[in-house]
Amino acid sequence: MGIPSEDELLRAARRFDRQALAEIYDRYSPVLYTYAMRLLGNPELAEECVADTFQRFLLALRAGGGPDGYLKAYLYRIAHNWITDLYRRQPPQIVELSENVAMDASTNPENAAETRLERERVRSALRCLTADQRQVIVLRFLEELSIEQTARALGKPLGAVKSLQHRALTALARLLEDRGKEQRL
Amino acid sequence: MNELNPISEAEIKQRLQVLRDMPQRNPHAALEGRARFLTQVEEISAQAVSQQGKQRHSGWIEKIRSNFIQRKERLPMLTQLLSVILILSALLGGGGATTVYASQSSLPGDWLYPVKIWSEDVRSDLAGNPSTQIELQLQFAERRVEELAELISKGQPLPDTVALRLENQVNHALQLAAKLQTTQMAEELPRIRQQLMTQLQVMEQLHSRDPQTEALLTRTRQMLQTRLRLVEGGIQNPDALRQQLQQQDRLHQQDQDQSQQQDQLQQQDQLQQQDRDQLQQQDQLQQQERDRLQQQDQQRDQLRQQTCTPQPQNTPAGMPQNGCCGNDAGNHGDGNGSGGNQDGKGK
């Protein structure tokens, strides 16, 4: 028997098939973790986001809800809403240096510090976008979802997503430029 | 995409790469997360089985109740949206759900835009929890900013109503927050601040060559800046924010009262004017009547003069003249033979 498709997994998950649910977790939790890390830059918060996303998914299944298809897009949407709520609840926080530098430890410390600063600049610019703009940028250019998959994740028509993407890129360009100027000053 | 200046789209994508490589996930945390998830699966599936058992006993009523009531607890937003769709479906004969869904991406000026606003109002009315109400007001305010951005990008004029609605929604969120207990307020204000900052960032990117549009954008930015300062002050001192909002409320109330008083005075003026007009009309009618009677008297006098014969010299003073004005004798009876009432007042 080959690898089950997303639809097969979803059908089994609706019957609370433990194996199918475990498979869903193993398949999607790594990408959701990376997604949350990219936006939050904090491993604990990213783990919390993943845990809450899967819990909401289970509760939706129990209530007879959940996705009709496109499970991955559905999970991205829950994680996105979780992060947006967090942004609204909490002001921007300073990220611990050690957590980001760990990956760059083998490289030149100056380069590592510069990478960390650039990452924070980009993250901060993303945070200043509207929730939908942020999600379209991350899904399209970091998670590399197609425009159709992004439209499903956002629950919007294709045309609206294209227009949103354009606006998001324009806004992000200005934000990055502004932050560049601030940095130079 | 040529509008991206000075950073190009390619450069943005390049700069986003810095977020591509993330530190590896901690394997212990990942395993713990998985174990926690599987425990939840066990618990929730056990509850689901237990509920199914109960449902088998209590029949279809219990099934319907559990479907609706559980969803209401777990997914309040979905339930509200469902309510809106059901109401609109009933009103629009089944096509309501599609209409409401389609309206959500509409812009001011579109024929579906009023449906979008209406569905927002209904959702807002259905929200019982103040925190949810604040959340909704912020969401709707964000939509207004998105609409302004989209209209600008399409080169369409900006209706004042969008900016006005944005201001009302931000104000409403603040008023709701100010009515909360201090601890709850302290949780809500940073959320509002974050949202206002994001909206302001977006607004600062919007510009137009049309002076009227630019003026509206400037006013909206100023409004957001004022509210942001208010919220920041409120985070430091919630009571001060409450007082400021109450003061604004009072001023607003006073404005409304003054406006009502002015309306009342205007109404009184109008009523007095109407009275004056009526009296004038009555005067005119009376004057017309007097003129008419005067004319009648003059005609009668003329007639009398024409028909009267000369009186003999020995007729006693005060006696009616024979064969002349006999019909008038009883009416006038003044004995002077002058032809009676000259001014018509006696009539």
Image: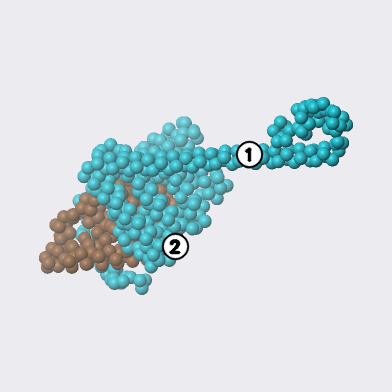
Q: Residues at marks 1 and 2, common chain? A: yes
Report the label total: 2
Read off the chain for label 2. B
Distance from the alpha carbon under mark 1 to that under mark 2: 56 Å
Residue at 30% across, 59% down: B201
Query: Mark 1: which amino acid?
Result: Asp
B33 to the left or right of B1: left
- Please name the residue that numbered disc 2 is placed on: B157
The hue in which chain B appears in the rendered picture of the protein: cyan
Which residue extends farthest front? Answer: B313
- Front in this rendered view, residue B294 or A129: B294
> Badge 2: how crowded within 10 Å, few (<14), some, or many (20+)?
some
Figure quadrant of residue B180 = top left
Q: Examine the rendered structure and indicate whether residue A134 appears above or below residue B39.
A: below
* Quadrant for the N terminus of chain B in the image: bottom left
**Which label was assigned to residue B283?**
1
Can see residue B295?
Answer: yes
| Three-letter code for the amino acid on which mark 2 is drawn | Pro
Q: Position of residue A86 (x, y in %)?
A: 28, 49
Relative height, residue A125 to residue B100 (above, below): below
Q: Position of residue A114 (x, y in %)?
A: 16, 66
Q: Position of residue B142 (x, y in %)?
A: 36, 53
Whether residue A21 appears in this view of the structure is: no
Chain A takes which shade in the image? brown
* Residue at x-position 18% and y-position 55%: A95
Residue B114 percent location from the top left of the image: 49, 52
Q: Nearer the viewer, residue A149 or B186?
A: B186
Can you tell which quarter of the image residue B189 is in? top left
Q: Look at 44% across and 60% down and name the residue there.
A: A157
- Which of the two discs, 1 and 2, labels the residue nearer the N terminus? 2
SS for tag 1? helix
